Image (cartoon, coloured by chain):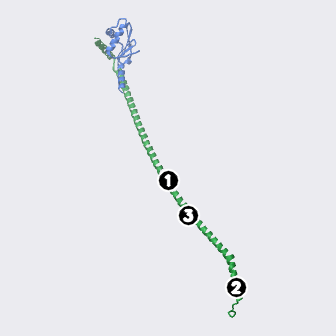
Chain colours: A blue, B green
Amino acid sequence: MVKSSNNFAEILEKLLRYNKNSEKTIMIITAVKLENADLSLIKKIFSLPENCKVVNKVDSNILGGLIFKFGSQIIDLSIKGQLKNFKKQFNFSI
Amino acid sequence: MESLGIDLKLLIAQLVNFILFFYIFKRYIAKPFSQFLKTELDKEKEKERILQEIKKKEEMFTLEEKRIKEKIKKEYEEALKNTKQEAMKVREKIITQAKKDAEEIILKARRQIEEERNEMLKEIKQKAIDLSLLIVEKTLSQFIDKEMHKKINQQILKNFIKRAD
């Protein structure tokens, strides 16, 4: 099952909870390759263990921002994702 | 008598002759003849009477015929009048129904037009949104360079840091 969320607190909680379970792989999709410093920062922010693999995938289609993929969860913080949300809201208002 | 030239015997003979003739005439000619005349007269009278009767009956028939004709004419006019009234009622009913149907059709058509208009507007709005977002995507993909990407990523991470604190 795939879920997406834009609420920072919720995202943080999910990531932290995920982290506590076991070693897993987190995929981060960006438009440009992340620096090692950024990867380290991410590990630090979400308190990821050393054995937790963080994989950075580059996809220019997302236009910008980040997409976190872990387990069955997807957290879309990309510009394309935001634009999709705008589109949904506009469609809803129509 | 003889000096006057009258023969008595002849006179008597003529007289007897006359009386005989008169008697015979009366008995054998006049009577039957008058009987015949009377019969003929009676027949004539009877004919007259029958003719009169026939005439009377004819007049009666004529009157009766006239009366029947007038009756038929009246009935015909009455029936015609009734039929006309019925026809007018039916005509009115048809016109009313036709007007009602026409109004319904117009209303239905207006509703349909309104629906189609709304649908079209919706479609146009949708297309406008899609087009706008497409333009934004294209613009951003051209506008955002590597440095901007980095800045965006760093900003996102900074927000995480703030929330984590």
Mark-to-mark CA distance, 1 and 3: 28 Å
Q: What residue is shown with label 2?
A: B14
Query: Chain letter of disc 2?
Result: B
Q: Residues within 10 Å of mark 1 (few under 14, many from 20)?
A: few
- In this view of the protein, which residue sits in the foreground, B13 or B98? B13
Mark-to-mark CA distance, 3 and 2: 57 Å
Query: Measuring 50% from the left and 53% from the top, which residue is drawn there?
Result: B75
Query: Chain letter of disc 1?
Result: B
Residue A26 in which image quadrant: top left
Against A82, residue B55 (above or below) is below
Q: Are marks 1 and 3 in contact (CB under 8 Å)?
A: no
Res A85 visible? yes
- In this view of the protein, which residue sits in the foreground, B165 or B36? B36
User: Residue A8 appears at what percent x and percent y?
Assistant: 32, 15
Quadrant position of the N terminus of chain B in the picture = bottom right
Specify the amino acid type for callout 3. Answer: Lys
Q: Same chain for labels 1 and 3? Say yes or no.
A: yes
Dot 2 or dot 1, earlier in sequence: 2
Mark 1: which secondary structure? helix
Against A22, residue B20 (above or below) is below
Specify the amino acid type for callout 2. Answer: Gln
Q: Same chain for labels 3 and 2? Say yes or no.
A: yes
- In this view of the protein, which residue sits in the foreground, B133 or A37? B133
Residue B3 in which image quadrant: bottom right
Q: What residue is shown with label 1?
A: B75
As drawn, the label of residue B56 is: 3
Mark 2: which secondary structure? helix
